[in-house]
């Protein structure tokens, strides 16, 4: 997987706390070549965050609804995804691609990086679509063991006979 530079996507709506969003986007944008994106369906939140961010490197994506926000987040497949809406667990069901997911206003990405325990080595640049964060399983060796009986092999012989040698 590609690890780095750091990325943060925040899904938020009109119920989200702007000062938490601004703090988290700013913290990630401080990394060299880091990416900070707010995805929201709230024009007023987008406008407020934009006015407070100044020259911070980042983007704001305005959506029709939170389902569209989840679709966009899945396409981005960010390293860190914060879901800062009223019921983040409901929206979590829509998320398929993210290195680490942080639910609610009191679970910033920094907690995952330094305290909560998931690996600090997470997939970036969209690779969360097909990779997970580094884990203990990456350091374990395994072997696949296959054992068919004669009867079982006879049941599946047709695709074997058709396959090229």
Image (cartoon, rainbow, N blue to C red):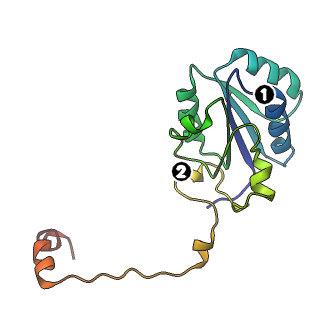
Residue holding disc 2: 129
Who is closer to the viewer here, 134 or 86? 86
Residue lying at 64% horizontally and 46% vertically, measured from the top left: 78
Quarter location, residue 85: top right
Q: So how many labels did they put on this image? A: 2
Quarter that holds the C terminus: bottom left
**Viewer-closest of 109 and 121:** 109
Figure check: 91 above or below 16: below
Residue 60 in picture, x, y percent from top left: 72, 27
Task: Identify which residue is drawn at 56% across, 22% down.
Answer: 65
Q: Position of residue 53 (x, y in %)?
A: 86, 28
What kind of element bears circle 1? loop
Element under disc 2: helix
- Residue 21: x and y, percent? 79, 33
Q: Residue furthest top?
A: 44
Q: Earlier in the sequence, mark 2 or mark 1?
A: 1
Residue 15 placement: quadrant = top right
Mark 2 and mark 1: span between their CA atoms? 29 Å
State the quadrant of the N terminus.
bottom right
Q: Quadrant of residue 39?
A: top right
Residue 163 sits above or below residue 55 on the image = below
Question: Which residue in the structure is indicated by mark 1?
Answer: 17
Disc 2 or disc 1, which is closer to the eye? 1
Residue visible at 68% across and 18% down in the picture: 42
Local packing at callout 2 (Cα closer than 10 Å; few below 14, some 14-19, many 20+) is: some
- Percent across and percent down for residue 94 are 51, 38
């Amino acid at each position: 997987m590609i690890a780095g530079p750091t990325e943060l996507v925040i899904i938020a709506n009109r119920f989200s706390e702007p000062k938490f969003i601004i703090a988290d986007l700013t913290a990630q944008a401080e990394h060299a070549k880091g990416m900070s994106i707010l995805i929201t369906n709230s024009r007023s939140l987008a406008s407020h965050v934009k006015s407070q961010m100044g020259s911070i490197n980042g983007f704001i994506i305005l959506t029709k609804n939170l389902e569209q926000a989840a679709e966009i987040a899945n396409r981005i497949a960010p390293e860190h995804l914060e879901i800062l809406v009223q019921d983040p667990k409901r929206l979590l069901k829509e998320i398929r691609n993210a290195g680490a997911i942080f639910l609610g206003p009191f679970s910033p990405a920094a907690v995952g990086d330094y305290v909560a325990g998931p690996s600090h080595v997470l997939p970036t640049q969209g690779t969360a679509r097909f990779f997970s964060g580094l884990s203990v399983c990456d350091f374990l060796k395994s072997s696949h063991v296959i054992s068919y009986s004669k009867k079982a092999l006879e049941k599946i012989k047709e695709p074997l006979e058709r396959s090229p040698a």
